[in-house]
Structures are given as C-alpha cells and as structure tokens.
Image: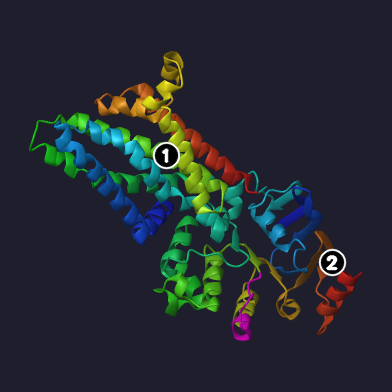
Amino acid sequence: MISLTAVTKKFNSTTAVNSITFNAKEGEIIGFLGPNGAGKTTTMRLILGYLLPTGGKITINNQNPLENRIEVLKQIGYLPENNPLYQEMKVQEYLEFIAYIKNTGKVKEVIDKVGLEEALSKRIEELSRGFKQRVGLAAALIGDPEILVLDEPTSGLDPLEQDKIKDLIKSLKKKTVIFSTHILSEVEDVATKLIIINKGNIAYDGAKPKGKGSVEKLFKRLLKG
Amino acid sequence: MFQLYKKELKYYLNSPIGYIIVILLSIFANFLFIKDLFVVGSASMKPFFSILPWIFLVFVPALTMRILSEERRTNTIEILLTLPVSETQIILSKFFALCTLTAIGLVLTAGLPVSLLFFTKLYIPEIIVGYTGSLLLASTFIGITMFFSSQTKNQVVAFLLSVITIFILLVLGTDFMATIFPKTILDFLNYFTPQYHLANFVKGIVDLRSVTYFATLVAATLFLTIVSLEKRD
C-alpha cells in the first residue's frame, strides 16, 4: 500500500528526514511515534505529496504521488497536524465541499460515524476542540479512502474524546492507517504495528511489543540509546 | 473547480470585507467621476475609465491580498493541497471568484452611464468595451496580487508589494515620466503600461494587441502563482 524507500527531506541545511524506509500494508494500523521535531509530520506530508522529497522514492498503491498526485490523493484521507479548518464555514457546508472535491456524495454515513449530527448547522469556529477534531476526522473519512494518515488525531482532547477517536480508528476495517501521537498508551490500545522515528531516522519498525507499558519502555530505551 | 470557485465567492459574500471593498470601490469611482463632471462640462465616460486604474491600485490588492497568504497563515493551504485537486484548479477558481467580485463592483458603477444618458447621447457599445477593458485591467492587478499573496503569510506585505508593483506600472504611463525619459524611450515604455492598452478599450476599440497584453500579464502572474504552490517549500 505505502512504501517509502530511502526517503530524505532537507530544509536548506537541516535534514528533517534522513533516508527512511518503511512499508505499510493493507489493514495495518501503524502507530508513528517520535519526540517533537523527530520528523513525523514531515514524513506524513511527504506521503501526501504536500512536501516534495529531496531524495528517495515513495509509492502509494504502486503509484508515484509526484507523477499521479490527484489519483494518489483520491486514495488517502488526511488529518493534518493542528487540524486546520475553514473556520467561517458551517460544518455541513465544509463536509459537502470536501465530498464534492472527492467526488462522493456519502457525507451522511461519515457524519453518523463520527457523531457530528448536532453540530452540522454550526460554524466551525463555534465548535469545541473535540468537535473540531471530529470535523477534521470526518473530512479525512469522506470518500471512504483506503489509506488514512492522521497527524496527532487526539492531540489536546480530553480522555473521553480521545477514547471516542481511538474506538473510531479501531473500527476502520481493511484500511491502512498511519497515525502519529505523543501518547504511548494510545499506540498500545490501537496500533497493530509500530514505527519510531528519532532525529529523522527510523529507530524501530516492527510489531508492537506486547504487554502493558512495553511501548513506553521500548520508546525510552531507543531514544536514550 | 466550480465548488472551489463557489467557496471563495461565498467567503466574500458571507463576510463584511467583500461588501465593504466592493461598495467602497463603487462609491470612490462614482464620486471621483461626478465631482469633476460639471466642471469639465463634458458628458463622457472617458474620465471615469481614466481614473479607474488608480482606484484599482488600492482596491484590487485590498480585495485580493488575503487569497493565499491567509491560507498559508492558517495552514488551510494544507487542506487544499492534499485534496484531489490540481494547483491550477485552485488558483483559477480563486482568480475567477475575485474577477466576479470586481465585476460586481463595476456593475455598481453602471448608474453613471445610465444617468449620463439624460444629458447626452452615449454610444453604448463603446461603454461596454470600456467596461470590458476595465475588467481586464482589474484581472491583471488580481493576478499580480495573487502572486504576492502566494509568497507570504502576511496579508499586509502582499498588499504593499502589490501596490508598489502596480504603482510602478501605472507611473510609467503618466506625463511625469516625460520629464525623465526622452520621447523614444517613453513611447517604448508606454507600450508596457496598462493605461496605454486600456485607452484602446475606452475608445471602443478591441485591439488584439491590448487583449494580448492583458491576457499575457494575467497568464504570467497566474503561472508564477501556480509554480510557487507547486514548489511547496
């Protein structure tokens, strides 16, 4: 589904991502971990083609996002970091706009899934952080994409909202999901695979270690090492 | 692309900013024309069209400055650029939405030729061609401002850079330049000024060279804007 081979991204003299290689297969839910500035968001933006790699190769379902950008983007739902939204738009209006661009009419299904019925007629700027996050998630889910790239989907949410979003991610069958987070327990709950990135390099790419607190132990060990 | 166009247009029509700018544009244009109308004693639309570039100098950048810089500042550009839509579609829909708003502003000045009809006989096709030229001129200024708006997150910077650039273009076509340059250079420079080409439209002439001039400037500025979006960094 997603394949990154020796992908590098430099911003002037700073290397944000250094020759990283990993794959994501159908049905995998990948927890993408790393400290601040490790290169998580840059990697996600590279997958989406929002940033152009300095070197290496990215393929999404055997397609190069640089050559078939629009075709690739039709297959991906994306929740960007900090969830930017058109604050002046109403929720329904925004979701219909996204649906139209993604060439699908199935908005109702997504609204039900993320629980946005009561907020549909409200302007996005009037919503709580939790509801805004649901709007961003709904936008990512519209069009039933095969791949979901979620950059800190539970960031800044209270525990109840976090649980709702975690349950939602777990309920996504047959999709490839890459989600980044700072909350290590979240990876234990949701992910089927774990990738840890540190200073632009892949520090771990493999199965999620079993047992409570094991992800945290691994994470700390790798970062200290 | 129509949905993108509609979204942009809706933003202006649902917020006071679009109304304020478009209405002020028409008020200024009407006022500056009427104030000299009875002094000059000539019932013609030509003075109106000659002041329009100077009115557009401020109002078009004011209307356009946020179009991409605001998307960059709030990072909503990341939404647009990760949706299955091309950069060209994004830019063209924004461009046409702004052209529509400017056209609305120009339509609000249509009372001028209508009222002049009470005093004199006007050749309507000439006025329509004049308005068409004015819209082409505004489109050029929209293109210039969109380019600067794509370069910065700061609307004010985009506005100032656009006003300076457009001002330089306009000043090249004024009599003031005759005090600096000899006539041969002046004639050459004049050919690159918007006023020179607008003048043809104001006379009621659709000169293909002038159409090409405006179309080239619009295409060049939009192309540069698209390239700057494609660059991503």
Asked if residue A162 is among those painted magenta in the image, a careful observer would answer yes
Would you place residue B112 above or below residue B23 in this image?
Answer: above
The answer to whether residue A29 shows anywhere in this view is yes
Quadrant in the picture for residue B193: top left
Q: What residue type is labelled 2?
A: Tyr
Q: How many labels does the image show?
A: 2
Residue plotted at (64% across, 74% down): A155
Quadrant, the N terminus of chain A: bottom right
- Nearest the viewer among B41 and B109 is B41
Q: Residue B24 carries which label?
A: none
Coordinates of residue B64 in the picture (x, y in percent)? 43, 48
Residue located beneath label 1 in the image = B141
Please tell me if label 2 and label 1 are on a single chain: no
User: What residue is rendered at 35% in x and 61% in y?
Assistant: B16
Magenta stretch, residue numbers: A152-163
- Res. A1 in view: no
Residue that mark 2 sits on: A204
Kind of element beneath mark 2 = strand
